[in-house]
Image (cartoon, rainbow, N blue to C red):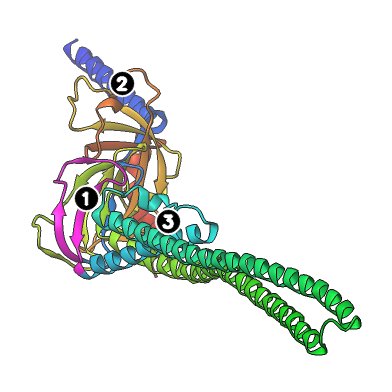
Amino acid sequence: MMIDQTKRLIRVGQLIIAIAFVGLGIWLALAPLQGAVIMMAQAKVDANRKAVQHNEGGIVNEIFVRDGDIVTEGQPLIVLRDAQAEALYSVTHTALDAELARHARLEAEMTGSTPKFPQALLQRKDDPVAAEMMRREQALFEERRRALAAQIALLENQAKSVGDEVEALKAQMAAERMGAAAAEEEMVSLASLKDQKFVANTRLLTQKRVISDYRSREEERRSEIAHAQSQREELRLRAVTLRSDLVRQAAEEAKASTTRIMELQDRLRPASDLLQRLTIRAPVAGRVLNLAVHTAGGTIAPRATLMEVVPDTGPLVLEGRVHVDSIKELHVGQAADIRLTALPQRTTPLLPGKVSYISPDALTVEDGATFYLVQLVPDSAEARSPLADLQPGMAAEVFIRTKPRTALEYLLEPVTDTMMRAFRER
């Protein structure tokens, strides 16, 4: 009886074990398990860090930032010192200012108005150099205008004097004409008396000489009047010529001045560009990192990286390295789960994301390690997303979901791979 009961218990145990093995086999063969490629990643702005460099290098004059400072795009970071560039810009700029002031004076002389200096000078009227240039050209304009006015006034006075002389000569000529008329009347009377034998012939001859003298003096006055009038017109013409000569000379000088201004502007552009490049500015808005310059007066090499600026705009991505053996299971758009290691694991949910980039070829670093670079974009669609706490530089553990496989496939994969390699060996 005891033997039968023992055999029955053994059979039940064997049945239970068989059922367990069959169930385990069915589970191993049919139950899908979610696969994943695990990698460590780091958060970064989608735009890469911007290296701040200077093409020519030079001597540091001022440093405005420190590591960790927040900067805006275009904000000055470092100013270099270059005495030669500053001197070249100063000389060229001063020459251009002087030529602009001179050109304004020449235009005023051409139009007869007052000098209208350009805004480039008027905006710097508090600058002693610019103010002196405008004052000097204004004074020269006033001096030349006074000199011209004095010359014209002198010529006009001379013309007026000649005009007065003409009037006096006309009066004298009228008197000579009247004298000649009176002498001719007297000549008629003398001729009648001569016919009556009361006057000798010599008296008539004398009277004729008197009339001839009057006529001669009248012609002299007429000639003098013509000469004086010609002289007066010449003086008036000289006054007009003075004005036209000044305008013509001013026009010629203004033309040459325009050419000179264009030449100076062409020379000023590279000088200004060189001077502006002495101020190193932030390429983007962000945070200063890895500042390599700390001392004013130090020297920086051409194209040396002075600092980096981590952009604070643009979406955050997670970047990590995947072993070359796992790359066959990855593709762009693949779903992933992200765990931010810096946040509490118990209260921080996994963050969904997708693979956005896989390097087209394997990369090798200095230590010889080979890997593929993979980037993921976190999904911020969830209402309670830990993205609000995600900062550039934070570490994360990423589980990139792969094709589900059964446990039996996981167990048999090493065996099948070994067998396939064995069958392929020669």
Label disc, if present, on residue 77 of the rendered structure:
1
- Is 133 left, or right, of 162 in this rendering? left
Q: Position of residue 279 (x, y in %)?
A: 25, 56
Residue at the spot x=24%, y=49% of the render? 76
Q: Position of residue 48 (x, y in %)?
A: 32, 48
Q: Which residue is mark 3?
A: 360
Q: Are marks 1 and 3 in contact (CB under 8 Å)?
A: no
From what the image shows, is residue 135 above or below residue 332?
Answer: below
SS of the residue under disc 3: loop
Q: Which residue is mark 2?
A: 15
Give the magenta part as a residue range: 58-83
Lower position in the chain sequence, tag 1 or tag 3: 1
Q: Are marks 1 and 2 in contact (CB under 8 Å)?
A: no
Q: Position of residue 134 (x, y in %)?
A: 34, 56
Question: Which circle, 1 or 2, is nearer the viewer?
Answer: 1
Q: Cα distance, mark 1 to mark 3? A: 37 Å
Viewer-nearest residue: 225 or 316:
225
Question: Which circle, 2 or 3, is nearer the viewer?
Answer: 3
Q: Position of residue 271 (x, y in %)?
A: 33, 66
Residue at the spot x=40%, y=40% of the render? 355
Q: Cα distance, mark 2 to mark 3? A: 55 Å
Viewer-nearest residue: 95 or 223:
223
Q: Identify the image quadrant of residue 61.
A: bottom left
Is the residue marked by circle 1 packed among few (<14), some (14-19), or many (20+) residues within 10 Å? Answer: some
Residue 64 covered by magenta stretch: yes
Q: Identify the image quadrant of residue 26.
A: top left
State the residue lying farthest toward the top.
Answer: 1
